[in-house]
Amino acid sequence: MPIMPYRISRLGLVEIRSLDLDRDLDYYLNVLGLQLTAREGKTAYLKGWDERHAYSFALTESDRAGMVRMAFRTVDPEDLDYYEKRLKDFGIKYDIIPEDYRRGRAIRFTAPSGHTVELYNEMDYTGNLLPTVNPGPWPEGLRGIAPPRLDHTLVTAPEPGKAIEFFQTVLEFRLSEMLVAPDGTIIAAWLWQRPAPHDIAIVPGKPGGFHHAAFVVDSADALFRAADILAMHKARIDYGPGRHGITRGTTIYFFDPSGNRLETFGGYTAYQMDPDSRAIRWTQDQIGPAVFYYSGWRHRRMRPRGDRTGRYPQSRGERHVRLPRWRLWHVQDASDLRPDRTRALFRRRSP
């Protein structure tokens, strides 16, 4: 089987909704510690301190939380023409966006998951916060957690198999890891083009659902410092510090004031991909350690042999909640949050 060339360099943009832009922008600047590029009307454009283009993250004021769009940057300008042809060949409707804020031509379409996806190549090159001659390892004067860059996003789909196949077949993403049912059906997948564990992950859930956007931290010290900063600012921590079995990445899940989930992801613990890397399989009975490696094993040992019921991960002030079966059903956004279940990854699906 021939190895496909890389045509997508990275996840270039995640845009999410904000219930109060002034409040949330203060949080993103002073707690998460992103850099503000500009505020245009109801949208603020931000980036990590080590990102060289104008922005990678956008907040748009709205009456609900969740994702507006995601965008991937291609390796070369010609790759846009290549993907436009593929969309035509597969009968996918798309629009050409001549330009956007500090960004050139893009292709916009809707994935089977219900998400707005864009492909682009040109964006203003603004450089990072370091000098280009004799730079230090990091800039002084950073605020908050100060992640260097955006890493990935995890989204939901009512029929994840169709969405996963679309990203694999049409956009030529590769599988790094997958969660499979006993019959071999793929339940969830982690997909990549750049040589890292994932640029996007897709799990079961609502159409167009947003689980989280992840920003890199580059050391264990940085991960624990992030936890300290979140606690000092009384931010709502969902899970962590901990580790994923899938990708091996260390993690903290937490919420912004509007209820959007974010992650500090320990890229220093995650592996790198080769073009011929083969996907890792996780079976459904091991979903606990696959997602939350440390607590997952603990809860697996607590279940009697043959007991297929699960438990929400317990945290201070919470009680165990028994479930009749394992079901991956993620909290979507602020409208779905329940005070006694904010750390829940597994939730019974309503009939």
Image (cartoon, helix red, strand yellow):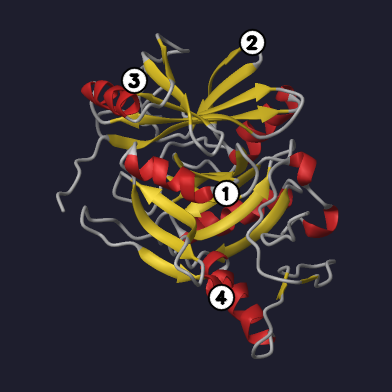
Tell me, for residue 174, which label it has, or none: none
Which image quadrant: the C terminus?
Answer: bottom right
Q: Are marks 2 and 4 in contact (CB under 8 Å)?
A: no
- Is residue 135 at all visible to an observer of this figure? no
**Which residue is identified by label 3?**
125
Tell me, for residue 285, which label it has, or none: 4
**Which residue is identified by label 2?**
41
Secondary element under disc 2, as helix, strand or loop, is loop
Q: Earlier in the sequence, mark 2 or mark 3?
A: 2
Foreground mark, 3 or 1? 1
Q: Residue at x 77, y 45 (%)?
A: 336
What amino acid is labelled 3 in the image? Tyr
Residue farthest to the bottom? Answer: 305
The residues bearing labels 3 and 4 have C-alpha atoms spaced at a distance of 46 Å
Q: Residue at x 44, y 67 (%)?
A: 184
User: In the displayed structure, would residue 46 be above or below residue 99?
Assistant: below
Q: Earlier in the sequence, mark 2 or mark 4?
A: 2
What amino acid is labelled 4 in the image? Asp
| Quadrant of res 334 | top right
Q: Are marks 2 and 3 in contact (CB under 8 Å)?
A: no
Q: Are marks 1 and 4 in contact (CB under 8 Å)?
A: no
The residues bearing labels 1 and 2 have C-alpha atoms spaced at a distance of 27 Å
Q: In the image shown, does 222 or 46 lie closer to the viewer? A: 46
**Which residue is identified by label 1?**
263
- Circle 1 packing at 10 Å, graded few (<14), some (14-19), many (20+), is many
The residues bearing labels 1 and 4 have C-alpha atoms spaced at a distance of 25 Å
